[in-house]
Amino acid sequence: MSRILLLSLPLLLTFCTERSTVEAYEIRINSQFQKAEDILSWMKSPTDDYVLVVSHRGDWRYAPENSLMAIQRCIDLGVDIIELDFRLTKDDHLVAMHDETVDRTTNGSGKVSEMTLAEIKKLRLKNACGVRGSQQQVPTLEEVMNMVKGKVLVNLDKTESKWVKEAYEVLKKTGTVDHAIFKGNDPVSVMRAKYGSIMDSIIYMPKLWYENPDLQGFYQDFEQDIDPFVYETLFDSESSQVYEFIPKLKADGNLFLAIALWDALCAGRTDEMALLEGPDKAWGWLIETGANAIMTDRPEELLLYLRAKRLHD
């Protein structure tokens, strides 16, 4: 199959299409990283000949978001990191759920915080189009980490400065502390006050926002305390202070994660632009800007593009 045909595939796909597992294996991307520990090692000393693919909520066009099937799809494709959301139940279990309620993504209703794990396990997930026919349950963090162990990393969202302790206990139980990336907006002083020495044991990724009132101070405080090796960047334009800060981030040897989900996060260089105007204008531009990793809602298409560029093999 020619490169031109491969890059035109996204234009033929609808939002609600569920492709078969056979097709997934036919286009499987074989990354140079075969183990989670290889991905983590590279992240600490990133090079310009590889770009990590971070899949947002799993491959949610293939299977329900944050589901085990959506996670397995990412593993099959060769995704490096899977971004997933977790919330705490009434009886203190972390479950994969983006919203405060289960209404949008399951056939039930109610707040996660007011439901027990047993109650949530009775629910069934909806697919990307909101169809209630799925047989899949809401997974726990423990189930997720046991599935990805040794294979890929997980970017923990929604835990932020709320449930780090609870998540850390699960990671210790499953032997996957080095498989999970925590992230958040709070200054390091706040995180240190809340979690003390746990901050020295976990992988933590500060978020650099374009609305941060003291970006330089925020960054320097983290560098002097826990010295992160990866930062999530959010810039709404090329005049954003975060965008202008990227050279400093790179010069210090840090990994720069770009978020291609919607305009305000990446100066408009989104997945949608990649599909409508060509991947060079979006993903290619982010890479030229210095991105070592890209978070996407189109993992399959991004992987195909990077492989064509020899940036993911």
Image: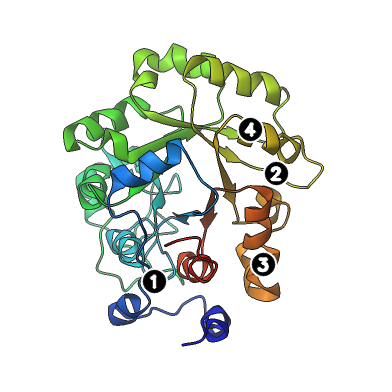
User: Where in the figure is residue 147, as x and y percent of width and height?
Assistant: 22, 52
Residue 111 appears anywhere in the view:
no
Identify the element where label 2 is drawn. Answer: loop
**115 or 170: nearer the viewer:** 170
Q: Nearer the viewer, residue 239 or 308?
A: 308
Q: Nearer the viewer, mark 2 or mark 1?
A: 2
Instruction: Choose mark 1 or mark 4, whichever is in front.
Output: 4
Q: Residues within 10 Å of mark 4 (few under 14, many from 20)?
A: few
Question: What residue is disc 4 on?
Answer: 251
Q: Position of residue 246 (x, y in %)?
A: 68, 38
- Residue at numbered disc 3: 280
Q: Amino acid at mark 2?
A: Phe
Q: Which residue does the numbered mark 2 point to in the structure image?
A: 235
Helix, strand or loop under label 4? helix
Q: Of helix, strand and loop, which one carries label 3?
A: helix
Quadrant for the C terminus, please.
bottom left
**For the point 21% across and 48% down, which residue is it?**
143
Please report contact status of discs 3 and 4: CB closer than 8 Å, yes or no: no
Query: Which amino acid, by three-letter code, is at mark 3?
Result: Asp
Residue 254 visible within the image: yes
Going from N to C along the chain, the mark reached first, 1 or 4, is 1
Q: Is residue 217 left or right of residue 196?
A: right
Mark whose residue sits in front, 4 or 2:
4
Looking at marks 3 and 1 on the same chain, the residue that comes earlier in the sequence is marked by 1
The answer to which of marks 4 and 2 sits earlier in the sequence is: 2
In this rendering, position of residue 47 left or right of residue 115: right
| Residue type indicated by callout 4 | Ala
Give residue 269's position: percent from left, percent from top: 69, 59
Q: Residues within 10 Å of mark 3 (few under 14, many from 20)?
A: some
Instruction: Residue 136 in the image: state x and y as whole percent.
Output: 26, 64
Disc 1 packing (10 Å; few <14; some 14–19; many ≥20): many
Q: Which residue is mark 1?
A: 62
